[in-house]
Amino acid sequence: MACGGALADWISLGVLASSVPRDVAGDAVAATGKGARRAGGKLPPQVMVYLVMALALFADDDYAEVAARLAGALRGWGGGDQVWDPTPGGITQARQRLGPEPLAEVFSQVAVPVADLDTIGAFLGPWRLMSVDGMEWDVPGTGKNRAAFGSSGTGGDDQAAFPKIGVVTVSECGSPAPVLAAMGAAAAKGSGEQSLARTLYPQVDEDWLLIADRNF
């Protein structure tokens, strides 16, 4: 155990670091105009990119535990020996400042097919096998989320406890690595899996054979 994390946690963070190099995180922050407002802050945007991804890796742990794991990893990546102990409130504020745009930019840069010709189930003849699928997630029941994603139910007392976000991905069958993704309201008019999928079809490569169920 180290910094509250098991060996598997460190392996996960190592894979994250190798998959998302620091220059990718920095370029994503710069491209989306989310650079630091002041120098010397405890939670610069580039670090927050990694912290948000780490929070997804360790979704059952609280902010402090995930931050402790990431602090150890950052030192291992050559981030220095400075004390890094952000408060949960500071993390929340930094996440709000960061917004979703840098994470979407990171995904667009690093999400690529990873299977090779020796990967079982990855190819059919000359075509790379890909699949499209959708899912829904509950998101916090804040006013902004309800305005953006709507709520299921008929309204009033029948309104769902949480708004839902719809996610459609195109993933590689052999890995399975997601390489394209679209998100939107799950309950609003004109939304849903088919509408989200249509935004992804123009990005499908010529050598992909896209598998879908009848819903699509």
Image (cartoon, rainbow, N blue to C red):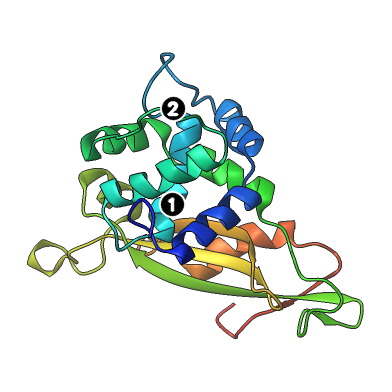
Which residue is disc 1 drawn over?
A: 54
| Left or right of 148 on screen, residue 51 | right
In depth, the one of 173 and 7 nearer the eye is 7
In depth, the one of 69 and 178 nearer the eye is 69
Q: Residues within 10 Å of mark 1 (few under 14, many from 20)?
A: many
- Residue 172: give its label: none
Residue 16 visible, this orientation: yes
Q: Amino acid at mark 2?
A: Pro
In depth, the one of 18 and 158 nearer the eye is 18
Looking at the image, is 216 positioned above or below residue 152?
A: below
| Left or right of 159 on screen, residue 136 | right
Residue that lies at the very extreme toward the top in this rendered image: 38
In depth, the one of 36 and 136 nearer the eye is 36
| Left or right of 198 on screen, residue 137 | left
Place of residue 183 in the rendered image (x, y in percent of width and height, measured from the top left): 48, 57
Q: Quadrant of the C terminus?
A: bottom right
Tell me what residue is drawn at x 58 percent, y 26 percent: 30
Q: Amino acid at mark 1?
A: Ala
Which residue is disc 2 drawn over?
A: 44
Looking at the image, is 166 positioned above or below residue 31?
A: below
Q: Residues within 10 Å of mark 2 (few under 14, many from 20)?
A: some
Residue that lies at the very extreme toward the left in this rendered image: 157
Q: Quadrant of residue 105?
A: top right
